[in-house]
Amino acid sequence: MKQLHEESQIDLLIFDLDGTLIDSRRDIANSVNHTLAKFNLPELSLDKVVEFIGDGAQKLIERSFPDITLEKLETALDIFKKHYQEHIFDNTVLYPGVDETLAHFSTKKKAIISNKPVVFTQQIIEHLFHGRFDLVLGGDSLPVRKPNPEPILKVLEEMNMPANQAAIVGDGSPDILSGKAAGITTCAVTYGFRTKEFLLQYEPDYCIDSFSKLKEIFR
């Protein structure tokens, strides 16, 4: 892993959303528990729901429901999405340092690649970030999602940017794995949904404990 003082020339910054730019845990957990209640199932703790986040809404519901059938999965997913749409900003906030750090990188190209459904991703970006990103992809924007490298390759193509000038910043293994597979720089953040110990096993190029430290590693 590189040290923070080893600055890299990066012209395209790609960000994960949940657990990286925004703390959305409570709103996601509330919508999961609302859905469970509709099926007369006990609610899950916040920490347990957070364990299930990261691979898209369908995986979240599959993991939250024991032995769910395909028919019930579709119904549960609809209930979850409707509730989350209505409560998406109840508790969700930016992590410390996000706003000013994004402003610091105002001259760089910036993109979002989230495994969250694109309708929610766009809604959050428009409400909280006011057009600061050049391209936004959600988990259903392409046939595949992270950790598949295709979303990153799509961004590189759209931005006309070589891999050696791009970096992905995220709090989960899908971010690191997709970045490595696409040949770009990877930076893990440890304040999000996964621990430092968990993230280090995937060998990111950088690992930071606050978003503001991006200013120390990317010129």
Image (cartoon, helix red, strand yellow):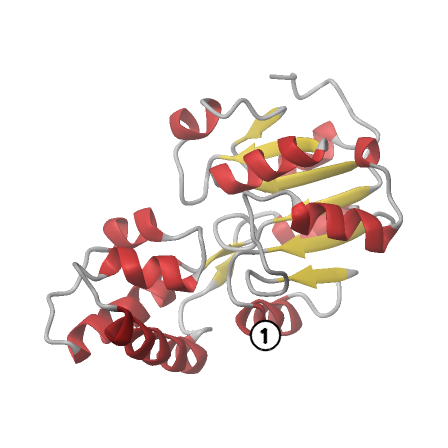
Image quarter (top left, top right, bottom left or bottom right) of the C terminus? top right
Image quarter (top left, top right, bottom left or bottom right) of the N terminus? top right
Q: Position of residue 82 (x, y in %)?
A: 39, 82
Left or right of residue 72, residue 141 in this image: right
Residue 91 is drawn in which quadrant? bottom left
Q: Where is residue 33 in the image (x, y as percent from the top left)?
A: 23, 69
Residue drawn at (29%, 60%) of the image: 62
Q: Is residue 103 visible?
A: no
Question: Which of 203 and 123 lies nearest the eye of the viewer?
Answer: 203
Question: Which of 172 and 107 lies nearest the eye of the viewer?
Answer: 172
User: What residue occupies the far front of the structure in this picture?
Assistant: 70
Question: Which of 169 and 81 lies nearest the eye of the viewer?
Answer: 81
Q: In this view, does 59 lie above or below 180?
A: below
Question: Which of 199 and 63 lies nearest the eye of the viewer?
Answer: 63
Q: Is residue 96 above or below residue 167?
A: below
Residue drawn at (72%, 35%) of the image: 215
Which residue, given by chain and number where applicable, does mark 1 sit on? 123
Q: Residues within 10 Å of mark 1 (few under 14, many from 20)?
A: some
Left or right of residue 7, residue 58 in this image: left
Three-letter code for the amino acid on which mark 1 is drawn:
Gln
Q: Position of residue 207 (x, y in %)?
A: 56, 27
Residue drawn at (89%, 49%) of the image: 160
Residue 81 is drawn in which quadrant? bottom left
Q: Can residue 172 be seen in this view?
A: yes
